[in-house]
Amino acid sequence: MYVQFISDDHFKNCVRHVLNAYDNAITLKESIAISIERGDVFQSLLFKNIVDPFKMAFDINKIGIEEWIKKEVLRQLDKSVEQKMGEFHQKILGGVGGWTDLGVGHEVDLMKNDKSIYIEIKNKFNTCSGDALTAVRRKLEEITRNNHDSTAFWGYIIAKTKQKSGEEVWIKSKFNKIDSVKKIWGEKVYEIVTGDTDALSKVYTALPIVIKEVIKEDKIVEVETIISDIIELLKPHLRSIQSEIYSEVFQ
């Protein structure tokens, strides 16, 4: 057993959820191949966002065109993976006995089955914009109004404060102090759900093992291999990409 508080199968499925984001590399490769066949590589997903040709000129001079392509592919993948990280923690904790992952479209992310605790969980302290965080606060207050004996948490894993893990009443500007509306962060999030003070650390320690096993079981192609294939596809077009990018942006 990887960790004591969730099943191995559940842990693997949570890892699969994140690894699926790397499938975007395959989609990117297919898009490039189709665009090359049509005679316009700039129609591929690699260039779906406007590229700064001046920064590109500096980057290529510094690291070379092939490394620039690799960097751009990884940057696009990173966005997809980053979006999955909050969902990863939500899914992991939703697999703990006595808890439910409410999924998308519900008032919050996690609920203790006896309805005594509700948690809106994010990956980082700054995941929510100002307006979004205000909406979270309102949701949590509504929950505690409707469930008088419950506590509602805004939880996040990565904190900015010196205290990397903690729990406190959530004091927010323009809102009244409500003792049952709290914020919680770091290891404390996992502790509240699992009852294990080392739960987050245990997940982190087991994670590389689980990732390797899922990759092996699912025969997932390494991203490095896909990136190498993308570079091979683009090799005949590297000079034109470098020379034509200015025209693509400005003309």
Image (spheres, rainbow, N blue to C red):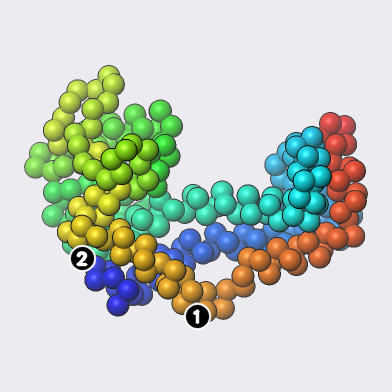
Q: Position of residue 215 (x, y in %)?
A: 52, 74
The answer to whether residue 97 is above or below residue 82 is: below
User: Which of 248/113 is in front?
Assistant: 248
Residue beneath the point at 68% across and 52% down: 71
Q: What type is the residue that disc 1 sits on?
A: Glu
Q: Which numbered disc, 1 or 2, marks the residue that appears first in the sequence? A: 2
Discs 1/2, front: 1
Classify mark 2: residues with Cα within 10 Å, few (<14), some (14-19) or many (20+).
some
Classify mark 1: residues with Cα within 10 Å, few (<14), some (14-19) or many (20+).
few
Residue 107 appears left or right of 249: left
Residue beneath the point at 46% across and 63% down: 17
Q: Where is residue 202 in the image (x, y as percent from the top left)?
A: 30, 65
Residue 168 appears left or right of 209: left
Q: Is residue 17 visible?
A: yes
Q: Which residue is under mark 2?
A: 97
For the C terminus, give its image quadrant: top right
Q: Are marks 1 and 2 in contact (CB under 8 Å)?
A: no
Q: Which residue is under mark 1?
A: 217
The answer to whether residue 250 is above or below residue 88 is: above
Q: Where is residue 168 in the image (x, y as percent from the top left)?
A: 19, 37
* SS of the residue under disc 2: loop
Residue beneath the point at 34% across and 48% down: 157
Q: Which image quadrant is residue 225 in?
A: bottom right
User: Which of 152/76 is in front?
Assistant: 76
Q: Residue 203 carries which label?
A: none
User: Which of 169/37 is in front?
Assistant: 169
Q: What type is the residue that disc 2 sits on?
A: Gly
* SS of the residue under disc 1: helix
Q: Which image quadrant is residue 4 in?
A: bottom left
How many marks on residues? 2
Q: Position of residue 92 (x, y in %)?
A: 33, 61
Q: Can residue 34 be seen in this view?
A: no
